[in-house]
Amino acid sequence: MHSAYACADNVNGLPLLGERMHALAAQLFPICRSITGDGVRETLRILQEHIPVEMLEVPSGTPVFDWTVPNEWNIRDAWIKNLQGERVIDFNAHNLHVMSYSVPVERRMSISDLRQHLFTLPEQPDLIPYRTSYYSENWGFCLTQRQLDRLIDPAYDVCIDSTLEPGHLTMGECLLAGETREEVLISCHVCHPSLANDNLSGIAVAVALARRLQEQRRRYSYRFLFIPGTIGSITWLARNESKTAAIKHGLVLTCVGDAGNITYKRSRQGSAEIDRAATHVLQTAGEPHRIMDFFPYGYDERQYCSPGFNLAVGCFMRSQHGTFPEYHTSGDNLYFIKPEYLARSFDRIWQIIEVLEKNRTCVNTNPKCEPRLGKRGLYGTTGGGRQDEFDELALLWVLNLSDGTNDLLTIAERAGMTFGKISDAAAALSRCGLLQKAVRPGSDC
């Protein structure tokens, strides 16, 4: 696996990387996860085989801002049996069959009473819906409409063998130290059961990013969070408020394995460096994409971007949550996500990381008129063809705008050129002494 993650820096390595990410999703797919419980722990233990994840446990009842860490939920078995004793709905066949956080139940019920606890999608009769009841005690079964239509007995035996009692909320954290203490946050949720795109795709891509970053020189430190949605980010922020000042950029990853075009949701700040970097990468990639303004609904970006923190954290996805028919149904399976789309998502996120890593503000050391590039080996070295002219233009843009107020990303935006082209030009100018770092705290050239 190490070589598959390592070779992602070239196009030929991406297909193999996509297969490895899909394989990790497939390994995690059968596990019944919720916002607490053994399913989350099992998931994190598997991630520990790939990256150094620390498992954090927070006791039930712990106050976290306006919330309280809930009781821990675990489930062993669940079923609905007909009067012949046959399981017509079986948790072991699909873990979406039980509403998450269902309290224990074991009784015989009339079909009319049972129907009040059954959830289907009549408009999608072959799919099982995903339902939860985290913060109010209830129970229920989810099934296809076709399964419901076959329930014709006057009564059924129902059993949910679960526990809901004081325990812990479990989070996973992986911190990769860089040259500075300033951090890039990568966050994904681990609270869904067998849902491949809305859960496992983000986890698989995050693991691949961490593996890749381990092998690289890093300007920033990188903090990966594998947490239950909403209550996980609230809990982490409540217990780590002093660490948030170091978070300079961040991404929430979700729904990154389907065939939809990439969507980026800006942070609450709107024009933070992460927003500009993501926009630039997507606009210069030559592929259809969508850039959305922040709105206070969605995934954990709404906690990181709450006004008391206002962190520069955007959300990276392909199809937006709730916009595809497989969302929160059994249709969100391992066939719905594809290795090629996982790989493409990884590649675009890696390009965003490269912008963050290489972006800096510099000063032209020879600002009065253009310096002679030829005598420094920066012009006409291969015959002055079209590509060299393009490179020369990048050099001239960097020289002209490097007055200590524009970072390289700004220069790329104004020049209408890729960040990589501008960054390479800046590196060449730095090597020959025509560019130096701006006298500004935190700048680096």
Image (cartoon, rainbow, N blue to C red):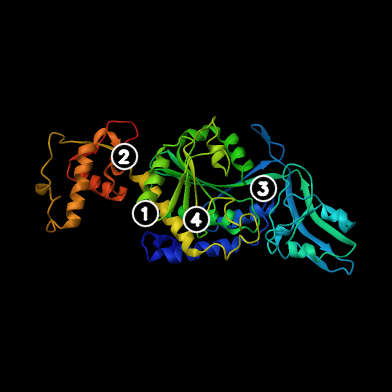
- First reached walking from the N terminus: tag 2 or tag 4: 4
- First reached walking from the N terminus: tag 4 or tag 3: 3
The crowd level at tag 2 (other Cα within 10 Å; few <14, some 14-19, many 20+) is many
Which quadrant of the view contains residue 276? top left
**For numbered disc 2, what is the local secondary structure?**
helix
**For numbered disc 1, what is the local secondary structure?**
loop
Q: Write the residue at 64% across / 50% down.
A: 191
From the viewer's perspective, tell me whether residue 264 is left or right of residue 147: left
Q: CA distance from mark 1 to mark 4?
A: 19 Å
* Residue 106 in sight from this viewpoint: no
Depth check, mark 1 against mark 4: the one in front is 1
Q: CA distance from mark 1 to mark 2?
A: 17 Å
Residue 285's tag is 1
Q: Amino acid at mark 1?
A: Ala
Which quadrant of the view contains residue 63? top right
- The residue that label 2 is drawn on is 410
Label 1 close to label 4 by CB (< 8 Å): no
From the viewer's perspective, tell me whether residue 227 is left or right of residue 95: left
Whole-percent x and y of residue 157?
Answer: 87, 61
Depth check, mark 3 against mark 2: the one in front is 2
Q: Amino acid at mark 3?
A: Ile
- First reached walking from the N terminus: tag 3 or tag 2: 3
Label 1 close to label 2 by CB (< 8 Å): no
Label 2 close to label 4 by CB (< 8 Å): no
- First reached walking from the N terminus: tag 1 or tag 2: 1
Q: Write the residue at 57% across / 63% down.
A: 336
The crowd level at tag 3 (other Cα within 10 Å; few <14, some 14-19, many 20+) is many
Which quadrant of the view contains residue 71? top right
From the viewer's perspective, tell me whether residue 384 is left or right of residue 328: left
Quadrant where the image shows the C terminus? top left
- The residue that label 4 is drawn on is 205
In the rendered image, the vertical position of residue 118 relative to residue 371, given as above or below: below
